[in-house]
Amino acid sequence: MRRGSRRGRGAAARSRAGGAGGSGGSPVALTGRGGIVVIFAAGLVGALLSRWLDWQVLAGAGFVAGCVLAALTTRPADLLTLVVSPPLVFLAVTVLAEFLTTLGQGSLLRGVTVGLLTALAGTAPWLFLGTLLVLLLSLPRGLPANVRELRAKLARTRLFEEEENENPVRWEESPDSPRDRRRLHHGEVD
């Protein structure tokens, strides 16, 4: 009888974890890296389409769509990784898109530099929107718990460092050691 009740509780716990409490109700649960790949892929497709079709809105819209999709499908345990990554992913997408669209058009360095500065200036609002949406969508899915866990880990690390540094005197380097007394007595100086 006891085993049956444990099985029932285990099934209920698995049901809750797989439902609304586990991955936000989503049937797909990406890792933090998987979420970053989703943002990168959607942003790159949008950036390349915007350059080929000469429609600037596609670059930002692709990035924002990738941010929303990643924020909704990433595992709650990996949300902290996802929340801090959109600016770097945005820069990488923009550099790669400019490099790919500038290939074979004369001066590669000049073309990429000018195109990168122009693209960043034109799509910066989309970067802020995508980053804000990832943050806002991650808050109810468990981001505060991730931050608390990170703070606790850092506090434990600092505690161990403080214990190690509690007595900074090294007995080998003590001026009262017999070796140092002999050196002082004989007038030896470093």
Image (cartoon, helix red, strand yellow):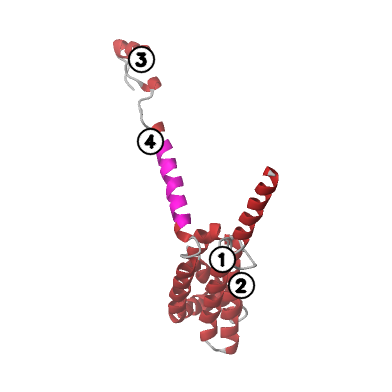
Question: Between disc 4 and disc 1, whose residue precedes?
Answer: 1
Residue 150 on the magenta span? yes
Cα–Cα span, label 3 and label 2 = 64 Å
| Badge number at residue 162 | 4
Which residue was labeled with disc 3?
Answer: 177
Q: Nearer the viewer, mark 4 or mark 2?
A: 4
Cα–Cα span, label 3 and label 4 = 26 Å
* Quarter of the image with the N terminus in it: top right
Q: Nearer the viewer, mark 3 or mark 4?
A: 4
| Badge number at residue 122 | none
Which residue was labeled with disc 1?
Answer: 24
Q: Nearer the viewer, mark 3 or mark 1?
A: 1
Question: Between disc 1 and disc 2, whose residue precedes?
Answer: 1
Amino acid carrying mark 1 in the image? Gly
Q: Nearer the viewer, mark 1 or mark 2?
A: 1
Q: Which residues, given as a range, are shown in magenta?
A: 145-160
Q: Quick one: SS at disc 4?
A: helix
Amino acid carrying mark 3 in the image? Ser
Above or below, 67 against 82 in this view is below
Amino acid carrying mark 4 in the image? Glu
* Quarter of the image with the C terminus in it: top left
Cα–Cα span, label 1 and label 2 = 22 Å
